Image (cartoon, rainbow, N blue to C red):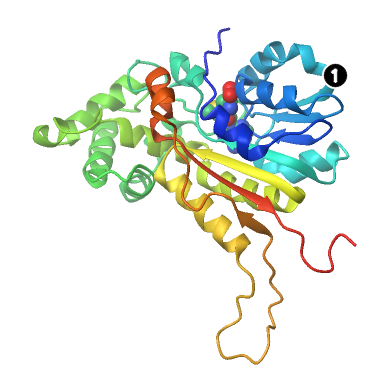
Amino acid sequence: MRFAHEPVMLQEVLQILNPQPGEIFVDCTVGGGGHSRAIVEKIMPGGRLVAIDQDKEAIKAAKKNLAAWSDSIHFVQRNFSALKEILTELGIEAVDGILLDIGVSSHQLDAEERGFSYRADAALDMRMSREDSKTAADLVNNLDAAELTRIIRDFGEELWAKRIADFIVAKRVVNGPIETTGQLVEIIKAAIPARARRRGPHPARRTFQALRIAVNDELGVLERALEQGIACLKPGGRLAVITFHSLEDRIVKKMFQHAAAGCECPPGLPQCVCGKKPQIKILTRKPLQAGEHELKVNPRARSAKLRAAIKVLNEGEGE
Ligand SMILES: C[S@@+](CC[C@H](N)C(=O)[O-])C[C@H]1O[C@@H](n2cnc3c(N)ncnc32)[C@H](O)[C@@H]1O
């Protein structure tokens, strides 16, 4: 198996996470192990890396690519939304750094049989973990038009969501279940008027993104992982998150802002009653993006946005 994933914004990630010998790091999305490799090199000697991925094939590839450090790495094939539980099971109370490089890997996109790509004809699957039960075909064939519209509009930001959903439902009533990515692409093309199809990216891109987000509950698991990640950092611990579309970036931005804010009492109270203290300091006022040089060698980095934060020590804590 070839895992040809170029780690995105690697230099920026290393600079911000600043891994040091002896530290404990978590890579929540180990993929082929590109970022992990660079991190593990820096935390040696004495460091430990928890390498998580829900995809069995990614864990297999990462184990192979990181074999030289296998004594210092815990490989975990789980959803990163179980971060806290995973660390507790490993006997780790708090960590020095956490990386999330969200989304599908190039390997998953290139593996036609996974059904992520609108450029290949394959079973309509899109599960990042093949142990999950719900596939894209299940959604497309079982949801009603209103629910499909909501998913395609909210997760794909697709202008033609309602027409696409109506075409999907009409087609399955006449021809039976929609089984393949190719069938779905044809339905989407038929639903979007020709003049709109000629502009912008591939007409199926937004709908495929939407279904993938829904199949893998990508926004829900990101929220849960960020909440737990912030809680699991040691004071001074760093958290870096790379996202590839605006819905995810918005979640990271909002959750960072919330965790970085102090008292949230309504104005006018004589003193704070909520007791909320800042948990983190945001390190990236605006998200960092890949530089020109990286974009030349790795076009996939074009939509990547990196946000980072550092855990703060509040008065009375850590004494
Ligand atoms: C963009 S790739 C990561 C590539 C990696 N940073 C590297 O340098 O090779 C994203 C990986 O995250 C995994 N992933 C996405 N969502 C996940 C989740 N909720 N839990 C665990 N792994 C997830 C995917 O299976 C995929 O392998």
Q: Position of residue 245 (x, y in %)?
A: 41, 40
Image quarter in which the N terminus is found: top right
The front one of 206 and 255 is: 255
Q: Residue at x 69, y 47 (%)?
A: 229
Q: Position of residue 286 (x, y in %)?
A: 46, 50
When the figure is inspected, residue 269 is found, relative to residue 206, above or below; the finding is: below
Q: Is residue 117 visible?
A: yes
The front one of 281 and 128 is: 281
Residue 39: image quadrant is top right
Does any atom of ligand 1 lie closer than 8 Å to the CB of label 1?
A: no
Q: Is residue 216 left or right of residue 164?
A: right
Q: Residue at x 60, y 19 (%)?
A: 32
Q: Residue at x 56, y 28 (%)?
A: 10
Q: Residue at x 34, y 27 (%)?
A: 178
Amino acid marked by disc 1: Asp
When the figure is inspected, residue 264 is found, relative to residue 109, above or below; the finding is: below
Q: Is residue 194 left or right of residue 214?
A: left
Q: What residue occupies the far top of the structure in this picture?
A: 1
Circle 1: element type: helix
Q: Position of residue 310 (x, y in %)?
A: 67, 50
Residue at mark 1: 71
The front one of 10 and 167 is: 10
Q: Position of residue 219 (x, y in %)?
A: 51, 46
Q: Is residue 187 left or right of residue 231?
A: left
Q: Is residue 184 left or right of residue 218?
A: left
When the figure is inspected, residue 32 is found, relative to residue 206, above or below; the finding is: above
Judged from the image, the quadrant occupied by ligand 1 is top right
Mark 1, Cα crowd under 10 Å, few <14 / some 14-19 / many 20+, is few
Q: Is residue 174 visible?
A: no
Image quarter in which the C terminus is found: bottom right
